[in-house]
Amino acid sequence: MELRVTSNEVITVNSDESLLSALKRTGIYLVASCGGKGTCGKCKINVIDGDFKAAVYGKLTAAEKESGTVLACQTFPLGDILIAIPKESRLVIGDQIAVSKTKDLVQYLRSYGVDINPFVKTISLDLPRPTITDNISDMERLRRALAEKEIYSMVFRHGFVLPMGRTLREAEWKVELSYIEDRDAGLEAIALYSRKSVDYGLAIDIGTTTVVVYLTNLKTGEVIDIGSTYNSQIKYGDDVITRIVHATESGGLEELKDAVLSDINTIVNSITERHSIDRRLIHSASIAGNTTMSHIFWGLDPGSIREEPYIPLLNSFPLWRASMAGLAIHPEARVYTAPCIASYVGGDIVAGVLASKMHRNEELALFMDIGTNGEIAIGNSEWIMTAACSAGPCFEGSGIRCGMRATPGAIESVSIDPVTLEPAIAVIGGGSPLGICGSGMIDAISEMLLAGLINQKGKFLEGKSYRIRRGDDGLEYVIHSDKRLKKDIVLTEVDIENLIRAKAAVYSGISTLIAEASLTMDAIERVYIAGGFGNYLDVDKAVLLGMIPDLPEERFTFMGNTSITGSYLCLLSEELRKEAEDLAAKMTYIELSVSKMFMDEYISALFLPHTDMNLFPTVASRLMTAMTPMKFWLMTNPDE
Amino acid sequence: MELRVTSNEVITVNSDESLLSALKRTGIYLVASCGGKGTCGKCKINVIDGDFKAAVYGKLTAAEKESGTVLACQTFPLGDILIAIPKESRLVIGDQIAVSKTKDLVQYLRSYGVDINPFVKTISLDLPRPTITDNISDMERLRRALAEKEIYSMVFRHGFVLPMGRTLREAEWKVELSYIEDRDAGLEAIALYSRKSVDYGLAIDIGTTTVVVYLTNLKTGEVIDIGSTYNSQIKYGDDVITRIVHATESGGLEELKDAVLSDINTIVNSITERHSIDRRLIHSASIAGNTTMSHIFWGLDPGSIREEPYIPLLNSFPLWRASMAGLAIHPEARVYTAPCIASYVGGDIVAGVLASKMHRNEELALFMDIGTNGEIAIGNSEWIMTAACSAGPCFEGSGIRCGMRATPGAIESVSIDPVTLEPAIAVIGGGSPLGICGSGMIDAISEMLLAGLINQKGKFLEGKSYRIRRGDDGLEYVIHSDKRLKKDIVLTEVDIENLIRAKAAVYSGISTLIAEASLTMDAIERVYIAGGFGNYLDVDKAVLLGMIPDLPEERFTFMGNTSITGSYLCLLSEELRKEAEDLAAKMTYIELSVSKMFMDEYISALFLPHTDMNLFPTVASRLMTAMTPMKFWLMTNPDE
């Protein structure tokens, strides 16, 4: 019989095989932190057509059951079956292409002028077998052998000593010792092996929305495989603030921690299983995440982050053990946490700036990471200022009527014919659109502005097109109408207001930092755009919106996920980890929420592109070209 | 109604009160590691007379139930009741006298020329409250305050950071920080408190047979209370060898570890409850035990200790955390383990030598600790040699027909009328004897030798007294006959052989070390006798037996439990802990089991007192006085 997935895969299945294992067999991994026992409730799929037998429905709600949702691990086909996999259920394990894209990471690391030098090192020791005349203890024997290699002091934790005697004897006294060098605690033994083994490491990016893991060979720097998934904390809230609120509720912190840990562990289990690698050979990990994500990963209360004066528990994290977090690798493995700057500028930004190299160059650069939140950094090799813009998650679709993340089904670009005023759309993955993502919204708004469907305040000019209609939230524009699904994809005036507030927060953050540095916008020689969003953003449109400064296009560089790149660099190089620490110490944090200047800048930016058109000369001229002077005057002065 | 205990206490009880709680109320503590839930099966008592209701019999065997054994925590009286408490069930919490005896310990500590300087220290920190302009993280704030006190580096474990934010705020930023200084890892934070609190510490002696705990105020050195109990590991074997064998069986190591930990924790719980002290304020502990006990305490496999070439996993233990052992004090508290010398000379001996001060004096001293095993050390401030004598546990009653430990009911001394050849006995605690303990055996054998009932080979002269009779193990001597119980207390020829082998092991150990040092016995200027046994030993009789060298009585000093004294010294003084480490490094271990010289010395010592009577001049003259020359000749040449 056949199993068809809506993405067009067709898999041959047997009735005694769960859909989870059938999918896994063909490389489609689902999130299944319980290992397929039906208890975690994460491997949800929708059966569109076909008969099946579901052993257990687990945590599914009555409504979910009704709508054909089942747990893939508990569902067995009774004949040909067609299913759809919701994006949240899908675990993305890197295919050949994704991994090959990371091939030049080792090269990139070397471009910093450093060698591979991970914080876990392995040393070979050949101990003389004990005799009645050389009868010192196992530990003294090990210390003596280390002293012969000029290592005179090492911390041996209880967890290391427990299996030590057995390992030494099984290895016939020829062992490999993995150890770390810790800033505060000096050398610490991690594990003892009886034969030559590879040290593995994990570079991890913990985003508010997604989690990415690189499994890496610590000797060669090679990325063996990549996995990514949605951060399951999403069910407790879309942004960091709602997560912090949940963390302060009874049991909430544990729920959040368990959610993201099970995401990471599921990826680690899947990747290591796929490559037949023993998870206990993973001796180190490096994580980069915003301050809240870093706190939650370690099970630390992020409560004070959202209370004035916005103080995190810690910015610089010790090299704690993997078992303290619950990371399913060697329990004594150490985990490096990219240093945070302040409550709302975290390790992801430090890792990102490190990956951009802006701190090494003389040219003035702007680094922007517009993900679930918006963080920026401005500076060069001399100084760096940083701030968080509270852009909110609306560019990721949150709080937007038909908003969604940039995943298949999302409208990613919109163009509006200046004559017919009819929109043309492009959908990620093709097919019918399910919603609109950040880049689609930016496109739509800038196109509507150019077409004269909205004014510079973001208000619809009613009657301009039959697509402008009155809905539940006031006026709205119909981007796409689906007769079959009876569902229209619209952008409402409220949505546009939200987006203008978000873009204003980003732009006024930048202008505040520029003003703090007594510079002007055109002094910015380079703009690094990071974050998942950075992959799709149309600079031209973002400038039109007034979200990013009106600078020549050649000054913009798209960096992709700089958090994972920085995390990788820190995993593999002692020197770059040190550089990240120095960088963090150098970055000056500006608290915008209490800045009078920021408030003024923000008010001025609540306009498309800005109340001060002199800041956006190319936009001013485009708007002039797009419409008659009279129209332009009317649009900029709608209340006249 | 009344509860009577055979030791003559009478307690008024109610029918809704368990016997366990009634006993506790009057200061009679039983071992009850489960806290009185009926599951651990340790609070066994025997009901001799009276009615009762037993809720649960738990782990009791059918035979035990039959014989009137009940669990005190599950038994409620229905009227006046008379019970007996087996010694194993009794937890001895120090009374006024026991504690007052430790009053001079602080004085003793100062006699070393050191001050109280525990390895846990507390520092007061007054942090400025965070503001929007001084918005560094809690951790940086703490580090900054420490730097102001010139502490620039400190390790902060995950367990310390977890509650840190809450404590800082509850304390309104005025805190007390407890930290330790670790040889390898530097300064490490232990706990943060919101108000001035006392640091407590535990000095612990883990004997093969008994466990002793001193709860100590780390500031004043005062011993607040004392607790002791039998090491529950006894049920898995009397001596270290049987314990090691058990440890190598599946689950055995955990059973042994759990047994001794629950003994210690029961004492700690009882003492702290009694003094209303929060167990989490106990920030350090110091343990002294033989090498096997030290390994088992930490859950480490002692297997290789009994396999040639007798290698322990480690002799010098890092300052591991209390939670690693399962000690019910502050989880981050550090536990100092007195360093061991070799597989059969452990931290109890290093602690003992430290307590004797022999390593500080020029005079040549012999240190003997005859407990469950027999360890000796010989030397002075220049050098110290040490060895284990494999005396075995027979002085503690093990392997002896009517042997028992030196507890109430034991015959502790025996004298035999040289004319009537009738014995007179003294029983610990008075009343009818239940058996004979080590000092009683030594008395009995030396008296029998003086009375001519046995010859110098330890063989009975049959027909000499009606008390010499033929039993299951050959000839035996009836020390006490109980018509009512129909039970005689005897010493058999096999018992005497065992005791001669044990005393020979001790003496030949001493003579081997003396020979190794190219000295003679009379060079020994001081003999320190340690161990529970040391409290009761009659030097005169032990010399007669040939167990200890024939030296003037004024050279002998009884030290009592030097292991707990040394443990206390290490708990309270950094300098003395360092001194213990240096001492351990200085002590040369001689492996007697492979020494040809020891075997020769041992064979020569299998005689009462010794084949070379020149070594025991006072004994030779006493034997001469006690009998006619002819008799003496006959006795020393029984086969002629």
Image (cartoon, coloured by chain):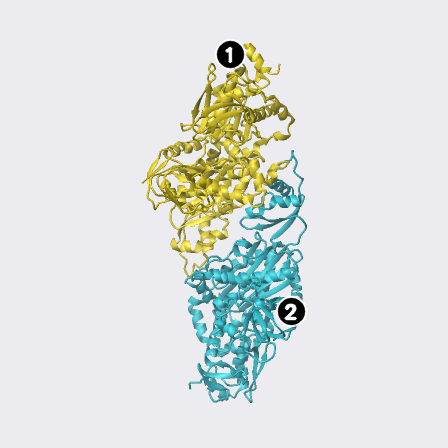
Chain colours: A yellow, B cyan
- Distance from disc 1 to disc 2, alpha carbons, whole Å, reads 100 Å
Image quarter where the C terminus of chain B lies is: bottom left
Circles 1 and 2 on the same chain = no
Bin the neighbour count of mark 2 within 10 Å (Cα to Cα): few under 14, some 14-19, many 20 and up.
some
- Residue A328 vs A533, above or below: the answer is below
Disc 2 target residue: B14
Host chain of mark 1: A
Which of A608/B319 is in front? A608
Which amino acid lies under the numbered mark 2 shown in the image of this protein? Asn
The secondary element bearing badge 2 is classed as loop
Host chain of mark 2: B
Disc 1 target residue: A625
Task: Write the residue at 60% across / 60% down.
Answer: B269
Bin the neighbour count of mark 1 within 10 Å (Cα to Cα): few under 14, some 14-19, many 20 and up.
few
Residue B84 appears in the rendering: no
Q: Residue A303 at x, y = what percent?
A: 60, 40
Residue B581 image-quadrant placement: bottom right
Which of A365/A383 is in front? A365
